[in-house]
Amino acid sequence: MTTVDPGRSPARLVVGVDIGNSTTEACLASIGPDGSITYLATDLTRTTGVKGTPDNTAGALTAVRGALERAGRRVGEVHTVLLNEATPVISGLAMETITETIITESTMIGHNPATPGGEGLGVGTTVPVGALPEQAPGQPVVCVVPAGADFDDVAAAVNAAVRRGVDVVAAVLAGDDAVLVTNRLDRPIPVVDEVAAVERVPLGMLAAVEVAAPGRTIRTLSNSYGLATVFELDPAQTRQVSPVARALTGNRSAVVVRTPTGDVTDRRIPVGELVLRGAGKTLRVDVDAGAEAIMDTVARVQPLDDAHGEPGTHVGGMLAQVRDTMADVMDVAGQPDVPVSEIAIRDVLAVDTFVPAEVRGGLAGEVALENAVALAAMVRTSRSRMQLVADLVSEQLGAAAEIGGVEGEMAVGGALTTPGVDRPVAVLDLGGGSTDAALLTREGECTAVHVAGAGELVTKLIDSELALDDRETAESVKRFPLAKVESFFHVRHEDGTVQFSDQPLPPHVFARVVVLTPDGPAPVPTWHGLDHVRRVRREAKRRVFVVNALRALRQVAPGANLRALDFVVLLGGSALDFEIPDLIADALAPHGVVCGTGNVLGTEGPRNAVASGLVRAHAAVLAEGARCPAS
Amino acid sequence: MPGELTAPGPRPAVLVYRHPAAPASVLRQVCAGVEEEGVPTDVTDVPGPDDATALAHAAAGESRLGVGIGLDAAGAAAVHHGTLPEQAPVLTTPAQALPSDWRRVGRVAARVVKHLPLV
């Protein structure tokens, strides 16, 4: 490959630079007059600033200098710097819950305190603990204890009342004292504790308290007919309380207070319609119908020209917000602002998800899993945003700077340097905002598509489904394997391997599900077990990357037939993920496709494809120029 | 009888070693914290070292559950586990802590026994 013809003009030193959303990569090569390429060095650094803005210059220069240093060359030797044309897509995300559980009157306490007391079912009238001495004997009562009460005093008050003949059948406490109180009672009763809003428990009302034995769940209050029996309800009333029973299913303890107008509603919020325009038609789909119905409709209007939400509905708000964000991102200094009305949404990915949301009207921070739809949307921009960066790089290095080629085509060129790959080849660039596919046919024709939804959507799904409310934690759950800390000295990995450590693990990770980050184990703030967290993580990746890989490849494959693809090369940051490439390969296996993570230049893994593709394309142009005058 | 086949020995419990001058209110809340989690405690007066961490480490070494709590004369508390080095206790609270902190000392000790997250 190394050919420098001393008789002709000497070899040129060129650097391909790929400025991505998160990393900037450089590929240094020397190109002979006949177009032969000698790769000298590569480098990788963090992208400075938002992709496509002049702030990128610093990162680009760092990468160029890094590659030069590795190759032992000087800045002055560089002939041309080749920059990528930024993928002309920007993506945005929105999420909206479509169900909501509201308790219109405070009728139930359905949380799961770690340590309730006693067991069994108690049904009686609610009475504050302070009023027990005045309570007449006979009638069954449920004792309600405010915050700050001492467990010895509560137990003494209940014991005294029982001795007087008051039938105390159960208790509801604000503090975490249920076991302590139960242990001090002469006659055991079920006790539910940690009820934060205990002052909102209606007094003088009929209430039922149920605590199941350890390892069991409640049987009566989670059963509609159990509630009907306890509260002597007629069929119409039973129908009304059935959402209460459903909300309490799976709990170890529960309290239901019967108030005259009490009701739990599980209502669907009108989300509105998504209006999709493309392929000469306009179709409308209810977002309530879920992700599958939305994606079916999107498929029927390919290629999509624009998407709108019904004004005044949730989906209208979601898309308007995406559009506003994109208008901000697209603004380039020195150019007029992009009018929001001109931003056309060219692809939409809908994903069904769920959001743990606090039940409105709950007394103990009860959480219900509400259904939600997440939307990723993508717009195209016609503006070249890289020229400013190219000018600055050229000025600082004293070399020519060119913007070469479409990112997708360059990536295919780079992917071809992976050992074992040949035309026709398709690449899947698994990025942060969009998933991009490009196909290079045997004849050398290249087509590229971009579909909405990638790594950032995965992070968002993990964040909301595990109720982490912390993007950083969600990001590390996505990127690193899980483990359970089983003692101060050992962890069990998610595959079951047990690893011993010489140094004690810190107490804040003890018995927790942790993410094994390079900085050590970090706790995942959730009560769910490791298996649940793992399932959420893998499902989020599958619903975004597998769905999008198939969607994007069908768009570039001849006749939308995946069998027509021979080689699929995975590129981009998410191709470095420890399971996404396997999930995609599994999904493509039935179509007889060779699929794997790219190894650009045989050394770079899925990195540097665009940077080295730029060098290849430049060399091809030089070779063409060298041949023409000669012939 | 099967029960007699094993030596009786002390029952498995979280051992609380307290300096004789340790405040009773601290001891009461600490023990309540362990009891609420359903784990037994045994309290022993240990005259001599007035250092919560050292007392907790000694208690953890003796406990058949491997978990000990130390209370010093001023009311400072520490939780220790038998496998940990003495200078690395599970939890310590200063002398001027609140009743809820003392309760947490007991709860954390019990949760080390039960292998639950230390909250």
Image (cartoon, coloured by chain):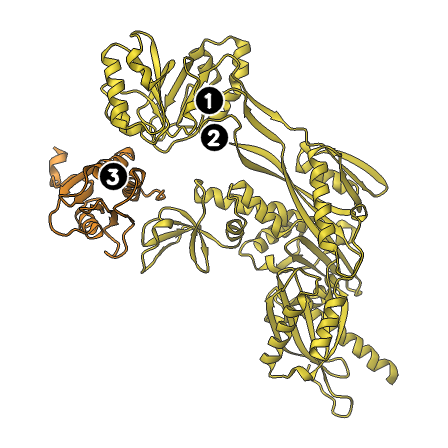
Chain colours: A yellow, B orange
Q: Amino acid at mark 2?
A: Glu
Nearest the camera: A488 or A105? A105
Considering only order in the chain, which callout, 1 or 2, is on the residue closer to the N terminus? Answer: 1
Say the numbered circle drawn on residue A366: 2
Between B98 and A119, the residue placed more toward the observer is B98
Mark 1 chain = A
Residue A308, by quadrant, is top right
Circle 2 crowding by C-alpha within 10 Å: few under 14, some 14–19, many from 20: many
Tell me whether circle 2 and circle 1 mark residues in contact (CB < 8 Å): yes
Which residue extends farthest front?
B96
Image quadrant in which the N terminus of chain A is located: bottom right
For mark 1, what is the residue?
A108
Residue at disc 1, secondary structure: strand
Q: Which residue is mark 3?
A: B30
Relative to B1, A340 lies left or right? right
Q: Residue furthest bottom?
A: A7
Report the side of B106 relative to A283 (left or right): left
Q: CA distance from mark 3 to mark 1?
A: 32 Å
Mark whose residue sits in front, 3 or 1: 3
Q: Identify the residue at horizontal 51%, vertical 25% (top origin).
A: A361
